[in-house]
């Protein structure tokens, strides 16, 4: 997994150089959130990165990928809570399923995030 960190960052840099922001932004997600999550990086550190990245994605007005960041943000915040305190649905201030479904982009990702919560919390 460590070997994927640099290529994901390179993908972001190359995407910016090519003007392909729509595909560059998910590379940041891989580099700062998804790969570190799989590697077992502390959730608190990943959440700090997500908060910073969500702001950048909002400022770049990339709403198609914003909900993916928000879904992971909500999931990781939920994973920090005791299982009894976590709602069974992902809905919350950081993420709304209805917003994600409007984009029609990577809708299956909702199932991944929900599955992670079920795996670790229920």
Image (cartoon, rainbow, N blue to C red):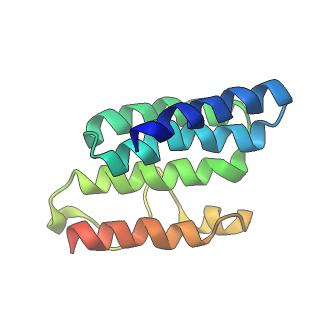
Horizontally, is 111 left or right of 39 in the view? right
Say if 62 sits above or below 106 in the image: above
For residue 93, say whether it is visible.
no
Q: Residue at x 67, y 35 (%)?
A: 11
Q: Position of residue 33 (x, y in %)?
A: 44, 42
Horizontally, is 37 left or right of 17 in the view? left
Extreme front residue here? Answer: 3
Q: Residue at x 21, y 75 (%)?
A: 122
Horizontally, is 42 left or right of 73 in the view? left
Q: Position of residue 24 (x, y in %)?
A: 70, 37
Q: Position of residue 117 (x, y in %)?
A: 32, 67
Q: Residue at x 32, y 49 (%)?
A: 77
Q: Quadrant of residue 82?
A: bottom left
Say if 41 sits above or below 109 in the image: above
Say if 101 sits above or below 41 in the image: below
Extreme right residue here? Answer: 19
Horizontally, is 116 left or right of 68 in the view? left
Number of disc labels: 0
For residue 65, say whether it is visible.
yes
Q: Residue at x 38, y 42 (%)?
A: 36
The one nearer the camera, 33 or 118, is 33
Q: Position of residue 18 (x, y in %)?
A: 84, 30
Q: Quadrant of the N terminus?
A: top left
């Amino acid at each position: 997994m460590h070997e994927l960190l640099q290529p994901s960052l390179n993908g972001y840099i190359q995407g910016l150089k090519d003007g392909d922001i729509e595909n560059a932004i998910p590379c940041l997600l891989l580099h700062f959130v998804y790969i570190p999550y799989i590697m077992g990086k502390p959730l608190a550190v990943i959440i700090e990165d997500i908060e910073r990245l969500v702001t950048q994605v909002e400022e770049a007005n990339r709403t198609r990928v914003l909900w993916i960041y928000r879904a992971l943000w909500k999931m990781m915040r939920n994973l920090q809570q005791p299982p009894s305190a976590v709602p069974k649905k992902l809905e919350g201030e950081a993420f709304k399923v209805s917003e994600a479904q409007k984009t029609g982009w990577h809708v299956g990702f909702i199932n991944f995030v929900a599955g992670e919560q079920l795996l670790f919390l229920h």
